[in-house]
Image (cartoon, helix red, strand yellow):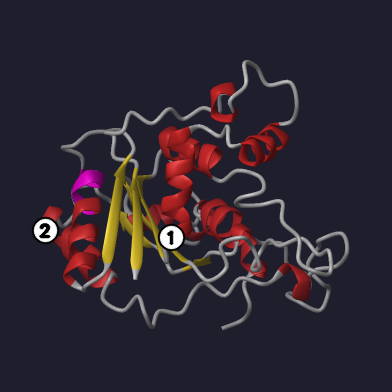
Amino acid sequence: MQALIVSAAPAASSLTADLAAVAGSTLREQGHEVVLLDLALLDWHPAVRPSDYGVEELTAPVGKHAVDAAASGSLAPEVRRHQELLRRADLVVLVFPLWWAGMPAILKGWVDRVFTQGFAYGLRDQQGNPRKYGDGAFAGKKGLVVTTAGDRAEAFGPRGVNGHIDDLLFPINHGIFWYTGIEPLPPLTLLGVDSPVWAGIEDARAQVRKRFENLATDEPLPYRRLLDDYDAERRLLDEHAPGRSDLAIHRRPA
């Protein structure tokens, strides 16, 4: 298996950097090929720029620029390189600290710049149906989120003040992975790392090693497929989870 680990560690000495390295070494020990991208070390620019598409200014929708640049070969070399790494990967692992209820800007910017139209989305099947939410460009790949958060685990529970951790990660697991066809595996959430109850770095490393033990047999999150479970307006069919509107309705029953 080829694994692509993308780390949004803010510094080489950060917990995120440490855990990304543990994830990489664990996968290598299992015999997998691993590419680890440390975005801060790469000085990755998080914002989409005209130079990404070989133009002086953006005069059309960004998606059109991306399609045109891919066709003409003018897509920025670093974007093309990261797209090739993503294309070859069987497993995509995103490692990041939870900042302001989401990914740090550098990682969101990696997605913004690398997951371009015509490459990651904007595709249709032979019948003209949109390929997304289960049948995307990256169908056959798996994705895994490894994230840390400072507040205690209870604060990310069903009644926690921060919101349920599953809901906070929904935009990534469902809106990025599943949208593009990547099957999201249950995430590893290391919570309470800034609280007195945190068990410490060795425990965190052990949790990462354990999480990577059974990747081949892990069941992905059972998200519903667009073409099977939604109407023409892309609303969940009334027969599924009637009377509910929480984010969990987008998962098939266990």
Q: Secondary structure at mark 1?
A: helix
Q: Residue furthest right?
A: 232
Disc number placed over residue 202 in the picture, else none: 2
Category of crowding for the residue at label 2, using alpha-carbon neighbours closer than 10 angstroms: few (below 14), some (14–19), many (at least 20): few
Main SS category, magenta section: helix
Between 236 and 113, the one lying in front of the other is: 113
For residue 65, side relative to residue 89 (left or right): right
Residue 195 counted in the magenta span: no
Q: Which residues make up the magenta segment?
A: 15-19
Callout 1 amino acid: Arg
Residue occupied by mark 1: 88
Category of crowding for the residue at label 1, using alpha-carbon neighbours closer than 10 angstroms: few (below 14), some (14–19), many (at least 20): some
Q: Please name the residue shown 66% across and 52% down the image.
A: 121
Residue 59 x, y percent position in the rendering: 74, 21
Residue 77 x, y percent position in the rendering: 46, 34
Rounded to the nearest angstrom, the CA distance separating label 1 from label 2 is: 32 Å
Between 123 and 223, the one lying in front of the other is: 123
